[in-house]
Amino acid sequence: MSNVTFHSQPSRQQKRRRTERILAVGALVLIGIALVLSSIRAESDLLSVLQQAVPEAELLERQADGVYAAWADGDRQELIGYVAVGRASGYGGPLDLAVVVDPEGQIIGLQVVSHKETQSWYDRVADRNFEAGLLGKSYTDEFRLGADVDSVTGATYTARAFAEAALDGSRLAAREMG
């Protein structure tokens, strides 16, 4: 008896399945690459906004939980403070605010990262220089509108979102300070 092996050609259906699998793997690889590039771009955009919040910082160094240490020099000799992004819900949706806290826990800088507010409400808060009333506040302070922080008539939800995001960011930074 002889051993004869027959090799059959793959059927059309088998070829199609193989092609579909290759395309599916290729699509997954492309999606993964897109997610990584998107994450890198988002981090770069965030660093740009954080730099605006603390322009005197020469170095921003990522710490735990998305908090950044802001250094006045590249040698890490002079700590300005910590920067964290606080979030709160405004009238139009989430408002993200970069909050700079000095080593004593006082807010020394703020910068809007993103918001979904109606532009006219946002402008009312910005035009009233509402953010200046949050400077000097500590993570231990209360941030109640009309009592601890000035209110903005006609933009209450937006003003409240600013105050709550500032408080949230200051508390995140305080955790990093211990």
Image: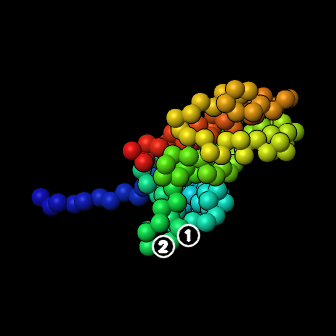
Name the side, left or right, on which 85 lies relative to 74.
right
Q: Are marks 1 and 2 in contact (CB under 8 Å)?
A: yes
Residue tagged 1: 58
What crowding class fits label 2: few (fewer than 14 Cα within 10 Å), some (14-19), or many (20 or more)?
Answer: few
Give coordinates of residue 103: x percent, y percent.
Answer: 48, 52
Q: For the residue marked with disc 2, what is the amino acid?
A: Gly
Q: Quadrant of the N terminus?
A: bottom left
Q: Quadrant of the C terminus?
A: top left
The kind of secondary structure element at disc 1 is loop
Residue nearest the viewer, comparing 87 with 127: 127
Residue, far left: 1
Instruction: State the residue at coordinates (41%, 58%).
Output: 9
Instruction: State the residue at coordinates (49%, 48%).
Output: 104
Q: Alpha-carbon distance for marks 1 and 2? A: 6 Å
Give coordinates of residue 175: x percent, y percent.
Answer: 43, 42
| First of labels 1, 2 by sequence position | 1
Q: For the residue marked with disc 1, what is the amino acid?
A: Glu
Residue nearest the viewer, comparing 39 with 12: 39
